[in-house]
Amino acid sequence: MQIIKDKAIVEDHWIHYSGEGDLPKGDVIVSFDYWAENKDKLSGRRLGLRLEPDSLVKNIQSDLDDFALIAINFPSFNDGRGYSIAKILRDRYGYAGEIRAVGDVMRDQLFYMQRCGFNAYEIKAGRDIQDALKAFDDFSVKYQTSSDEPLPLYRRR
């Protein structure tokens, strides 16, 4: 499967694990609930954590270094809580790993997701990933501060 990561299309090797059946070998992304119940079984593995829009980031604050990536689910394009989760991870908790948008992720959202701290995107099935990549060039000027631009426009002049 291809994803967009750091503004480039790359092959993805991560496996989304639903919690059913045997835990696959390799790099896996697990749900918060599965991780909370199986921390011991998962220690020593390269691990990704999937958060839902109602997840509380403070519940993983002390364990952030355990995750190579954090996937934030967008069950619907009009549910914006994932933007806040990414912003909190980057700005408040200093998470430097991959933050990936998964679920109902479309081109129109990518520019704004990047501003909040996302750096990887699983584009919704049926959408053109090549076209989605162009979203990062939709706007040339950013007026306000954000995770990707710490200074407001008037300070950059």
Image (cartoon, rainbow, N blue to C red):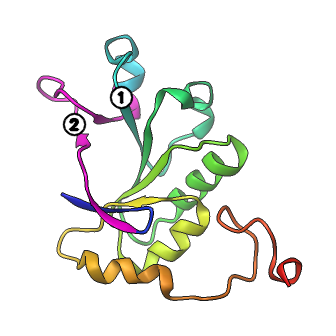
The structure residue drawn at horizontal position 48% and vertical position 26%, both measured from the top left corner, is 66
The structure residue drawn at horizontal position 47% and vertical position 48%, both measured from the top left corner, is 98
Q: Position of residue 21 (x, y in %)?
A: 11, 26
The structure residue drawn at horizontal position 49% and vertical position 85%, both measured from the top left corner, is 137
Mark 2 burial class by Cα count in 10 Å: few <14, some 14-19, many 20+: few
Figure check: 103 above or below 66: below
Seen from the viewer's position, the closer of residues 19 and 54 is 19
Q: Position of residue 94 (x, y in %)?
A: 67, 42
- Asked if the residues shown at circle 2 and circle 1 are in contact, with their CB atoms under 8 angstroms apart, the answer is no
**Image side of residue 95 versus residue 123, left or right:** right
Q: Position of residue 157 (x, y in %)?
A: 86, 85
Secondary structure state at the residue bearing disc 2: loop
**Image side of residue 136 versus residue 8, left or right:** right
Figure check: 70 above or below 151: above
Q: Which residue is mark 1?
A: 46
Residue flagged by tag 1: what amino acid is it? Answer: Arg
* Mark nearer the N terminus (2 vs 1): 2
Bounds of the magenta segment: 8-34
Mark 1 burial class by Cα count in 10 Å: few <14, some 14-19, many 20+: some
The residue sitting at the left extreme is 21
Secondary structure state at the residue bearing disc 1: loop
Figure check: 133 above or below 119: below
Residue flagged by tag 2: what amino acid is it? Answer: Ser
Figure check: 119 above or below 46: below
Q: Which circle, 2 or 1, is nearer the viewer? A: 1
Q: Which residue is mark 2?
A: 18
Q: Is 100 contained in the magenta span?
A: no
**Image side of residue 17 versus residue 110, left or right:** left
The structure residue drawn at horizontal position 17% and vertical position 75%, both measured from the top left corner, is 126
Q: Quadrant of the N terminus?
A: bottom left
- Residue 57, picture quadrant: top right
